Image (cartoon, rainbow, N blue to C red):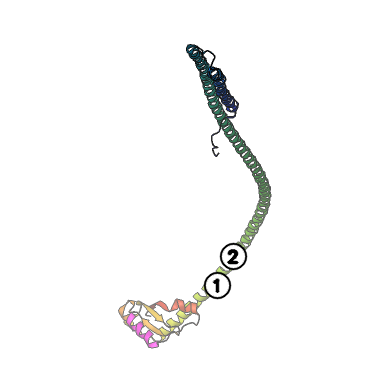
Amino acid sequence: MAKKGWSWPSEWTVPLALSVLVHVVIVGLMIFGMNFKMPFDKTPLQVELATPDEPQPDNREIVQAVTVDQAAVEQRVNEIRERERQQDLAEKRRQEELERRAVEARKAREAEQQRLRELQQEQEAERRKLEQEKAAAQKQREEAEQAAAAAAERRKREEEAAAKAEAERKRKEEEARKAEAERKKREQEARERAERERQLQEELERESQERASARRQQVQSEVDRYSALIRNTVTRNWIVDDSMRGKECRLNITLARSGFVTSVSEGEGDRAVCESARRAILKVGTLPMSKDPDVYEQMKDITFPFKAE
Protein backbone atom coordinates (compact mmCIF):
# COMPACT_ATOMS: atom_id res chain seq x y z
CA MET A 1 0.00 0.00 0.00
CA ALA A 2 1.27 3.46 -0.90
CA LYS A 3 1.96 5.72 2.07
CA LYS A 4 -0.03 8.97 2.27
CA GLY A 5 1.49 12.33 3.31
CA TRP A 6 1.44 13.29 6.99
CA SER A 7 -1.66 15.20 8.16
CA TRP A 8 -3.08 16.38 11.46
CA PRO A 9 -5.09 13.71 13.19
CA SER A 10 -8.77 14.55 13.10
CA GLU A 11 -8.97 14.44 16.89
CA TRP A 12 -6.36 17.26 17.13
CA THR A 13 -8.16 19.79 14.85
CA VAL A 14 -10.71 21.20 17.33
CA PRO A 15 -8.32 21.57 20.34
CA LEU A 16 -5.72 23.21 18.11
CA ALA A 17 -8.25 25.68 16.79
CA LEU A 18 -9.38 26.48 20.35
CA SER A 19 -5.78 27.02 21.43
CA VAL A 20 -5.13 29.42 18.57
CA LEU A 21 -8.38 31.25 19.35
CA VAL A 22 -7.44 31.57 23.05
CA HIS A 23 -4.02 32.99 22.13
CA VAL A 24 -5.66 35.52 19.78
CA VAL A 25 -8.11 36.62 22.48
CA ILE A 26 -5.32 36.97 25.06
CA VAL A 27 -3.23 39.10 22.71
CA GLY A 28 -6.30 41.20 21.89
CA LEU A 29 -7.06 41.75 25.58
CA MET A 30 -3.47 42.79 26.22
CA ILE A 31 -3.61 45.32 23.41
CA PHE A 32 -7.03 46.45 24.46
CA GLY A 33 -5.91 46.78 28.12
CA MET A 34 -2.94 48.86 27.15
CA ASN A 35 -5.05 51.13 24.95
CA PHE A 36 -7.68 51.32 27.65
CA LYS A 37 -5.15 52.63 30.23
CA MET A 38 -3.48 55.13 27.95
CA PRO A 39 -6.22 57.87 28.07
CA PHE A 40 -5.91 58.03 31.82
CA ASP A 41 -2.15 58.35 31.47
CA LYS A 42 -2.55 61.24 29.02
CA THR A 43 -5.32 63.07 30.82
CA PRO A 44 -3.06 65.25 33.04
CA LEU A 45 -1.13 66.34 29.97
CA GLN A 46 -4.30 67.27 28.09
CA VAL A 47 -5.74 69.06 31.14
CA GLU A 48 -2.50 70.89 31.52
CA LEU A 49 -2.63 72.01 27.95
CA ALA A 50 -6.27 73.02 28.10
CA THR A 51 -6.09 74.83 31.45
CA PRO A 52 -2.67 76.23 32.03
CA ASP A 53 -3.95 78.30 34.86
CA GLU A 54 -4.99 75.30 36.95
CA PRO A 55 -2.55 74.06 39.45
CA GLN A 56 -0.32 71.16 38.20
CA PRO A 57 -0.79 67.75 39.79
CA ASP A 58 1.94 66.22 41.74
CA ASN A 59 4.44 64.38 39.56
CA ARG A 60 4.80 61.74 42.21
CA GLU A 61 1.10 60.99 41.87
CA ILE A 62 1.42 60.72 38.13
CA VAL A 63 4.45 58.47 38.38
CA GLN A 64 2.70 56.43 41.00
CA ALA A 65 -0.40 56.11 38.85
CA VAL A 66 1.68 55.14 35.83
CA THR A 67 3.67 52.75 37.98
CA VAL A 68 0.52 51.25 39.41
CA ASP A 69 -1.02 50.87 36.00
CA GLN A 70 2.16 49.41 34.57
CA ALA A 71 2.41 46.95 37.45
CA ALA A 72 -1.20 45.99 36.97
CA VAL A 73 -0.55 45.51 33.29
CA GLU A 74 2.55 43.50 33.99
CA GLN A 75 0.67 41.49 36.59
CA ARG A 76 -2.12 41.00 34.12
CA VAL A 77 0.35 40.07 31.45
CA ASN A 78 2.12 37.72 33.85
CA GLU A 79 -1.20 36.20 34.79
CA ILE A 80 -2.08 35.84 31.16
CA ARG A 81 1.37 34.40 30.43
CA GLU A 82 1.08 32.04 33.39
CA ARG A 83 -2.37 31.05 32.26
CA GLU A 84 -1.01 30.65 28.75
CA ARG A 85 1.91 28.66 30.11
CA GLN A 86 -0.46 26.52 32.12
CA GLN A 87 -2.64 26.22 29.06
CA ASP A 88 0.45 25.45 26.97
CA LEU A 89 1.50 22.82 29.52
CA ALA A 90 -2.01 21.47 29.59
CA GLU A 91 -2.14 21.64 25.83
CA LYS A 92 1.29 20.02 25.63
CA ARG A 93 0.21 17.28 28.01
CA ARG A 94 -3.02 16.96 26.07
CA GLN A 95 -1.04 16.87 22.82
CA GLU A 96 1.34 14.31 24.32
CA GLU A 97 -1.68 12.35 25.53
CA LEU A 98 -3.23 12.68 22.10
CA GLU A 99 0.03 11.65 20.52
CA ARG A 100 0.31 8.74 22.97
CA ARG A 101 -3.26 7.79 22.22
CA ALA A 102 -2.59 8.26 18.52
CA VAL A 103 0.50 6.01 18.79
CA GLU A 104 -1.49 3.49 20.82
CA ALA A 105 -4.34 3.81 18.35
CA ARG A 106 -1.88 3.36 15.45
CA LYS A 107 -0.28 0.41 17.22
CA ALA A 108 -3.72 -0.96 18.03
CA ARG A 109 -4.76 -0.39 14.40
CA GLU A 110 -1.56 -2.00 13.15
CA ALA A 111 -2.04 -4.84 15.63
CA GLU A 112 -5.65 -5.16 14.49
CA GLN A 113 -4.52 -5.06 10.89
CA GLN A 114 -1.85 -7.67 11.68
CA ARG A 115 -4.47 -9.73 13.51
CA LEU A 116 -6.81 -9.33 10.54
CA ARG A 117 -4.00 -10.33 8.16
CA GLU A 118 -3.15 -13.31 10.35
CA LEU A 119 -6.82 -14.15 10.59
CA GLN A 120 -7.09 -13.81 6.83
CA GLN A 121 -4.01 -15.97 6.41
CA GLU A 122 -5.46 -18.52 8.84
CA GLN A 123 -8.76 -18.39 6.98
CA GLU A 124 -6.91 -18.76 3.66
CA ALA A 125 -4.85 -21.63 5.10
CA GLU A 126 -8.04 -23.19 6.47
CA ARG A 127 -9.72 -22.69 3.09
CA ARG A 128 -6.79 -24.27 1.32
CA LYS A 129 -6.72 -27.08 3.87
CA LEU A 130 -10.43 -27.65 3.36
CA GLU A 131 -9.95 -27.59 -0.40
CA GLN A 132 -7.04 -30.04 -0.09
CA GLU A 133 -9.06 -32.26 2.23
CA LYS A 134 -11.99 -31.99 -0.15
CA ALA A 135 -9.72 -32.83 -3.11
CA ALA A 136 -8.14 -35.69 -1.12
CA ALA A 137 -11.60 -36.95 -0.15
CA GLN A 138 -12.72 -36.65 -3.78
CA LYS A 139 -9.59 -38.48 -4.90
CA GLN A 140 -10.12 -41.18 -2.27
CA ARG A 141 -13.76 -41.47 -3.32
CA GLU A 142 -12.76 -41.71 -6.97
CA GLU A 143 -10.03 -44.23 -6.14
CA ALA A 144 -12.51 -46.21 -4.05
CA GLU A 145 -15.03 -46.11 -6.90
CA GLN A 146 -12.33 -47.14 -9.36
CA ALA A 147 -11.18 -49.90 -7.00
CA ALA A 148 -14.78 -51.06 -6.58
CA ALA A 149 -15.31 -50.97 -10.34
CA ALA A 150 -12.02 -52.81 -10.88
CA ALA A 151 -12.98 -55.36 -8.22
CA ALA A 152 -16.38 -55.83 -9.82
CA GLU A 153 -14.78 -56.20 -13.23
CA ARG A 154 -12.17 -58.57 -11.80
CA ARG A 155 -14.92 -60.57 -10.05
CA LYS A 156 -16.88 -60.69 -13.29
CA ARG A 157 -13.82 -61.88 -15.19
CA GLU A 158 -13.08 -64.43 -12.48
CA GLU A 159 -16.66 -65.70 -12.62
CA GLU A 160 -16.53 -65.85 -16.40
CA ALA A 161 -13.15 -67.56 -16.20
CA ALA A 162 -14.48 -70.00 -13.59
CA ALA A 163 -17.53 -70.75 -15.74
CA LYS A 164 -15.29 -71.15 -18.78
CA ALA A 165 -12.89 -73.34 -16.80
CA GLU A 166 -15.80 -75.47 -15.56
CA ALA A 167 -17.13 -75.82 -19.10
CA GLU A 168 -13.62 -76.62 -20.30
CA ARG A 169 -13.21 -79.16 -17.50
CA LYS A 170 -16.48 -80.86 -18.42
CA ARG A 171 -15.50 -80.77 -22.09
CA LYS A 172 -12.12 -82.29 -21.28
CA GLU A 173 -13.74 -84.90 -19.05
CA GLU A 174 -16.12 -85.78 -21.85
CA GLU A 175 -13.25 -85.87 -24.32
CA ALA A 176 -11.22 -87.95 -21.87
CA ARG A 177 -14.16 -90.32 -21.43
CA LYS A 178 -14.61 -90.59 -25.16
CA ALA A 179 -10.85 -90.93 -25.63
CA GLU A 180 -10.74 -93.64 -22.98
CA ALA A 181 -13.61 -95.45 -24.62
CA GLU A 182 -11.95 -95.01 -27.99
CA ARG A 183 -8.62 -96.18 -26.52
CA LYS A 184 -10.24 -99.26 -25.06
CA LYS A 185 -11.97 -99.88 -28.35
CA ARG A 186 -8.70 -99.44 -30.24
CA GLU A 187 -6.91 -101.67 -27.75
CA GLN A 188 -9.57 -104.30 -28.16
CA GLU A 189 -9.40 -103.99 -31.91
CA ALA A 190 -5.60 -104.04 -31.71
CA ARG A 191 -5.71 -107.17 -29.56
CA GLU A 192 -8.13 -108.79 -31.96
CA ARG A 193 -6.08 -107.63 -34.93
CA ALA A 194 -2.87 -108.78 -33.24
CA GLU A 195 -4.49 -112.08 -32.52
CA ARG A 196 -5.61 -112.42 -36.13
CA GLU A 197 -2.18 -111.32 -37.33
CA ARG A 198 -0.55 -113.76 -34.92
CA GLN A 199 -2.73 -116.53 -36.18
CA LEU A 200 -2.09 -115.45 -39.75
CA GLN A 201 1.64 -115.18 -39.05
CA GLU A 202 1.62 -118.56 -37.50
CA GLU A 203 -0.24 -119.87 -40.52
CA LEU A 204 2.18 -118.10 -42.83
CA GLU A 205 5.16 -119.35 -40.87
CA ARG A 206 3.76 -122.79 -40.87
CA GLU A 207 3.16 -122.58 -44.59
CA SER A 208 6.58 -121.00 -45.06
CA GLN A 209 8.18 -123.70 -43.04
CA GLU A 210 6.30 -126.28 -45.02
CA ARG A 211 7.35 -124.58 -48.24
CA ALA A 212 10.91 -124.23 -46.98
CA SER A 213 10.95 -127.82 -45.90
CA ALA A 214 9.59 -128.91 -49.24
CA ARG A 215 12.07 -126.61 -50.95
CA ARG A 216 14.93 -127.96 -48.89
CA GLN A 217 13.85 -131.45 -49.69
CA GLN A 218 13.61 -130.50 -53.33
CA VAL A 219 17.01 -128.78 -53.33
CA GLN A 220 18.58 -131.61 -51.38
CA SER A 221 17.12 -134.10 -53.78
CA GLU A 222 18.60 -132.13 -56.68
CA VAL A 223 21.92 -131.82 -54.87
CA ASP A 224 21.93 -135.55 -54.30
CA ARG A 225 20.97 -136.20 -57.90
CA TYR A 226 23.63 -133.90 -59.38
CA SER A 227 26.20 -135.15 -56.91
CA ALA A 228 25.57 -138.64 -58.19
CA LEU A 229 25.79 -137.40 -61.76
CA ILE A 230 29.11 -135.69 -61.03
CA ARG A 231 30.46 -138.78 -59.32
CA ASN A 232 29.34 -140.98 -62.19
CA THR A 233 30.88 -138.57 -64.73
CA VAL A 234 34.19 -138.48 -62.87
CA THR A 235 34.15 -142.29 -62.36
CA ARG A 236 33.66 -142.89 -66.10
CA ASN A 237 36.78 -140.88 -66.82
CA TRP A 238 38.84 -142.07 -63.83
CA ILE A 239 41.52 -144.67 -64.48
CA VAL A 240 42.13 -146.76 -61.35
CA ASP A 241 44.96 -149.37 -61.13
CA ASP A 242 45.08 -152.32 -58.78
CA SER A 243 47.39 -150.56 -56.29
CA MET A 244 44.73 -147.91 -55.56
CA ARG A 245 41.79 -150.18 -54.99
CA GLY A 246 40.06 -149.72 -51.67
CA LYS A 247 41.81 -146.40 -51.02
CA GLU A 248 40.02 -142.99 -50.65
CA CYS A 249 40.60 -139.24 -51.21
CA ARG A 250 38.53 -136.17 -50.52
CA LEU A 251 38.70 -133.46 -53.12
CA ASN A 252 37.20 -129.96 -52.94
CA ILE A 253 35.82 -128.78 -56.26
CA THR A 254 34.67 -125.26 -57.17
CA LEU A 255 32.28 -124.91 -60.09
CA ALA A 256 30.94 -122.13 -62.23
CA ARG A 257 27.18 -121.76 -62.79
CA SER A 258 27.57 -123.69 -66.03
CA GLY A 259 29.33 -126.59 -64.22
CA PHE A 260 32.79 -125.61 -65.47
CA VAL A 261 35.49 -126.74 -63.04
CA THR A 262 37.34 -123.68 -61.86
CA SER A 263 39.58 -125.43 -59.33
CA VAL A 264 40.33 -128.75 -57.68
CA SER A 265 42.15 -129.09 -54.39
CA GLU A 266 45.15 -131.40 -53.84
CA GLY A 267 42.88 -133.49 -51.69
CA GLU A 268 43.14 -135.36 -48.42
CA GLY A 269 43.81 -139.09 -48.40
CA ASP A 270 45.87 -141.42 -50.52
CA ARG A 271 48.16 -139.38 -52.70
CA ALA A 272 47.90 -141.60 -55.73
CA VAL A 273 44.12 -141.79 -55.46
CA CYS A 274 43.88 -137.99 -55.06
CA GLU A 275 46.15 -137.32 -58.03
CA SER A 276 44.37 -139.80 -60.21
CA ALA A 277 40.88 -138.52 -59.30
CA ARG A 278 42.02 -134.89 -59.74
CA ARG A 279 43.28 -135.64 -63.27
CA ALA A 280 39.99 -137.29 -64.13
CA ILE A 281 37.98 -134.22 -62.95
CA LEU A 282 40.16 -131.75 -64.86
CA LYS A 283 39.90 -134.04 -67.92
CA VAL A 284 36.13 -133.83 -67.85
CA GLY A 285 36.34 -130.02 -67.46
CA THR A 286 32.59 -129.40 -67.13
CA LEU A 287 30.49 -131.33 -64.66
CA PRO A 288 26.70 -131.65 -64.55
CA MET A 289 25.11 -128.57 -62.80
CA SER A 290 21.46 -127.74 -62.07
CA LYS A 291 19.93 -124.52 -63.32
CA ASP A 292 18.30 -124.04 -59.92
CA PRO A 293 20.15 -121.22 -58.06
CA ASP A 294 19.59 -122.84 -54.68
CA VAL A 295 21.07 -126.11 -55.91
CA TYR A 296 24.03 -124.22 -57.42
CA GLU A 297 24.60 -122.34 -54.14
CA GLN A 298 25.08 -125.66 -52.36
CA MET A 299 27.19 -127.21 -55.10
CA LYS A 300 29.43 -124.42 -56.31
CA ASP A 301 31.95 -125.29 -53.60
CA ILE A 302 31.58 -128.95 -52.81
CA THR A 303 33.82 -131.66 -51.31
CA PHE A 304 33.55 -135.16 -52.84
CA PRO A 305 34.87 -138.33 -51.30
CA PHE A 306 36.38 -140.56 -54.00
CA LYS A 307 37.08 -144.26 -53.33
CA ALA A 308 38.95 -146.41 -55.86
CA GLU A 309 37.10 -149.67 -56.62
* Residue 187 included in the magenta stretch of the image: no
Residue 246 falls in image quadrant: bottom left
- Kind of element beneath mark 1: helix
User: Whole-percent x and y of residue 258?
Assistant: 45, 85
Label 2 to label 1, Cα distance in Å? 19 Å
* Residue 280 included in the magenta stretch of the image: yes
Q: Residue at x 37, y 78 (%)?
A: 251
Q: Nearer the viewer, residue 133 or 309?
A: 133
Q: Nearer the viewer, residue 223 or 134?
A: 134
Disc 2 to disc 1: CB gap under 8 Å? no
User: Three-letter amino acid code at disc 1?
Assistant: Ala
Magenta residues, as a range? 274-286
Q: Residue at x 66, y 46 (%)?
A: 153
Location of the N terminus by quadrant is top right
Q: Residues within 10 Å of mark 1 (few under 14, many from 20)?
A: few
> Residue 275 vs residue 197: left or right?
left
Q: Earlier in the sequence, mark 2 or mark 1?
A: 2
Q: Which numbered disc covers residue 214?
A: 1
Q: How many marks?
A: 2
Q: Which numbered disc covers residue 201?
A: 2
Residue projecting furthest to the front: 53
User: Whole-percent x and y of residue 52?
Assistant: 53, 17
Answer above or below: position of 284 versus 293. Answer: below
Q: Residue at x 69, y 50 (%)?
A: 167
User: Three-letter amino acid code at disc 2?
Assistant: Gln
User: Whole-percent x and y of residue 171?
Assistant: 68, 52
User: Whole-percent x and y of residue 240?
Assistant: 35, 84
> Residue 40 vs residue 308: left or right?
right
- Kind of element beneath mark 2: helix
Answer above or below: position of 263 versus 110. Answer: below
